[in-house]
Image: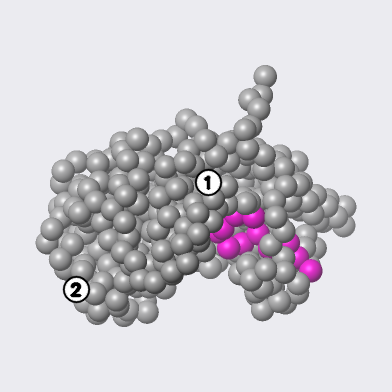
Amino acid sequence: MEKALKYSFATSCEREGTNAEKYVLRKELFGTDDILPVWVADMDIDTPQCVLDAVKQRLQHPVMGYEEVPKSAFMAQVEWMKKEHGVDLNVEDMLYSHSVVASMHTCIEAFTKEGEGVIVQTPVYPPFFHSVLKLKRKLVKNSLKLDSEGTYRFDIEDLKTKIDKNTKLLLLCSPHNPVGRVWQKEELQEILEICLQNDIIVFADEIHSDLVYQPYKHIPFASLSEEAKNITLTAVGVGKTFNMAGFAMSSVSIPNKELKEQFKKAYDRVHFAQGSSLSHVAFEAAYKKGKRWLEDLKEHLYNNYLMLEAVAEKYPQFIKITPIEATYLGWIDCRGMGLTDKKLRDFFINEAKLGLNPGLSFGREGSGFMRLNFAVSSAKMTEIVRRLESALQRREIG
């Protein structure tokens, strides 16, 4: 008997007509407003009521001036990370950041010089390689391997050949966006050993760590060992977990005092400040009161994924869904359609009336793939699937 969800995700508030990025930019990115946007990685699902209630309560006080991040907010995150992921963080090691991308950019500036190497494991979230190139560092591409089952793995042998004395930093996406992998302890251990042998610092983007499906378990890189903790900067936050990207609040944890001091030099040059008073209370409320909502959300998201998988199983000659272990981002292998990347994008826009991320934007290894965000209500997912299936059916007939 299926468990009844306490929270309903059958419908959600309509975002069209608001300033939502994924809707506002449709014409600019896709050439038409006549699509359902399923690209940018936020949810078309209402933010938890406990978060909204905390913000309403804060608004009872009429002054919105400068505020420090309260220790209680970071303590709520520390307790969450310990309970959910078994990692011990300390409030003293944590810094406020408005986004993981900002933290990553700062990390590159802090620990590398122009021309020095930064390892990026493609296909991956575009800011990973864009940040490296914008800062004139050397992009060290260690592409993931795709096996016959459609699962991506680290290419350890390739990584060993790519490293030289000027390779200083590895950007780890864990869980991985867009391929949906939850790296196992043994896999992470291999990465750790290589980094320790070569004095390479690890920036661990773990923003999707709470969106992991059974039976998988997220392993924070810093939790592998004391040595791992000493070379790792961990970036995590509430943006993906609770659909709170608009609050622009995350943290970066740096247990090694020397690394924290070095990071702070670049961090202070930018002047991150302390963020918004409303973000502080929202962040704390999510971690303290959002657990049950998240559990129900994950069940809902996985059901959406299964709907997408069912379409792929119906048209295996055209598309395959990469097995998902985490995130709400479907990585669709469309190479069976025999289209160029441009024509593939046109197919989704003009025939399926859906706005997806082209796989090529995640690196050359993403050619022939598309990324679809299935973090939507049941009603919207039904429509997404209907549009995709109709387009594939027409293609099969035609």
- Residue under pointer 2: 265
Is residue 171 or residue 281 the one in the foreground? 281
Q: Residue at x 12, y 61 (%)?
A: 258
Q: How is the image coloured?
A: one colour
- Check the image and name the residue furthest to the left: 258
Whether residue 198 is situated above or below residue 18 in the rendered picture? above
Q: Quadrant of residue 115?
A: bottom left
Is residue 276 or residue 360 the one in the foreground? 276
Work out which quarter of the rendered image holds the N terminus and state it. Answer: top right
Work out which quarter of the rendered image holds the C terminus and state it. Answer: bottom right
Answer few, some or many: residues within 10 Å of disc 2's Cα (few below 14, many 20 plus, some between 14 and 19): few
Q: Is residue 379 left or right of residue 231?
A: right
Which of the two discs, 1 and 2, sits closer to the camera? 1
Q: Write the start and end of the magenta stretch as one range.
A: 34-44
- Residue under pointer 1: 50
Identity, as a three-letter code, of the amino acid under mark 2: Lys
Q: Residue at x 47, y 30 (%)?
A: 215
* Position of residue 62 measured from the top left corner of the image (x, y, whole percent): 47, 67
Whether residue 192 is situated above or below residue 136 in the rendered picture? above
Is residue 345 or residue 57 the one in the foreground? 57
* Position of residue 221 measured from the top left corner of the image (x, y, whole percent): 29, 46
Q: Residue at x 46, y 62 (%)?
A: 61
Q: Quadrant of residue 189?
A: top left
Name which of mark 1 and mark 2 comes first in the sequence.
1
Under circle 1, the secondary element is: helix
Q: Is residue 277 magenta?
A: no
* Position of residue 107 measured from the top left corner of the image (x, y, whole percent): 27, 67
Q: Is residue 37 magenta?
A: yes
Q: Mark 1 and mark 2: span between their CA atoms?
A: 36 Å
